[in-house]
Amino acid sequence: MLRVWAEVLTRDPQYLQRSIIMKLTITGYSTALFSTWYFVEELGLLFDAGDGITAALLQKARKIDNVFISHADRDHLTGLLQFNQLNAREGFPKIFYPFNSSSFPAIETFSKNFDPHVSGTTWKGIKENAHIQIKDDLYVQSIRNNHVPAEKDVFKSFGYQVYQVKNKLKKEYAGLSQEEILQRIAEIGKERMTEQIRTNILTYSGDTPVDDPERWNNTKILIHEATFLGEQELNHANTHRNKHSNLEQVLRMVSRLNIETLILGHFSSRYSNEEIDRSIRTLCDQLKIKIPVYRVLPGEVNRNILAGEPINNTI
């Protein structure tokens, strides 16, 4: 096995750095007040579980091993009961949620009483910056956002980042032959010959105001909410309810960050599709945003989002 490893590194010293940054198949539905969920097929990963998720995914829902809920608003979790009822098996799915959200233990208790066969499902409250391993080289990190006002040590609302961890051959060994690599492995071990590379391949903001842009920097794909188009509506809503973002704030933030692809969702159903698309195109032009921007329109299940054409037509 070591000889194979050495042979690969001789041909391609960066081999172990290569990420799965395969074309991710992301399917989603996101309409403010009604339902939000995003399914990442290759990763067996679900962010939020709003109403209608199981009906939209059918048998594909069985691929989901890990569910990360951003907060306890009903439009982000009411699909959990049906999803769990159809897909529960021993140890799966694993459902993660903000530690201080009491709604989830209540749902867990109800579901186990109502459907005893779901007792194998794992429910776990997590705190800020928790690292949840979902595959050998992938973990999800919880990121606090300020959608739900809470004290510093109280955790009510999260975004999530997916990291891939790979190793690459250190520079000082890059020119070695296969036999020389094998010799060094025998002397010092392969762990000392490589360095770890972390890549943020996907970030999901959850519902959040735009208040700490650095949280979302340096990600391959950012899924971010943009509930409102107008600043006036946003200011009124953020005064009386949990806090949200508006489209201009999000795009202005993205224009200053290192992000490769943007997916916008959680638009209010008060806006027509034409209003949303026109606003995105206008702002992308004004802010000179060249990365591909996709959107999930209100009331629509968007299948394989990244296979479509960006709304700003950059590629």
Image (tube, rainbow, N blue to C red):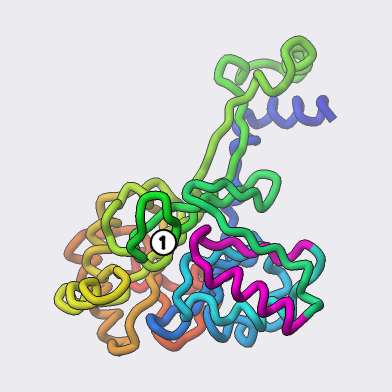
Left or right: residue 60 compared with residue 252 = right
For mark 1, give the secondary structure. Answer: loop
Q: In the figure, residue 57 lies in which quadrant?
A: bottom right
Residue at image point 36% right, 50% down: 152
**Residue shown at 37% from the left, 57% from the top:** 145
Q: Where the C terminus falls, by quadrant?
A: bottom left
Counting from the top left corner in percent of width and height, residue 201 is at: 51, 51
On screen, residue 263 versus residue 187, left or right, reads left
Which residue is the extreme one toward the top?
187
Q: Name the residue under label 1.
A: 205
The answer to whether residue 42 is visible is no
Identify the amino acid type marked 1: Ser
Residue 136 x, y percent position in the rendering: 70, 45
Residue 129 appears in the rendering: yes
> Along the line of sight, which residue is nearer the eye, 275 or 91?
91
143 vs 1, left or right, is: left
Q: How crowded is mark 1: few (under 14 residues within 10 Å), some or many (20 or more)?
A: many
Q: In the image shown, does 7 or 262 lie closer to the viewer?
A: 262
- Counting from the top left corner in percent of width and height, residue 194 is at 63, 24
Residue furthest to the right in view is: 1
The N terminus sits in image quarter: top right
Q: Does the magenta stretch include residue 103?
A: yes
Q: In which quarter of the image is residue 236?
A: bottom left
Closer to the camera in the image, 254 or 54:
54
Vertical placement of 87 versus 125: above or below? below
The span shown in magenta is 91-115
Residue depicted at x 63% and y 64%: 95
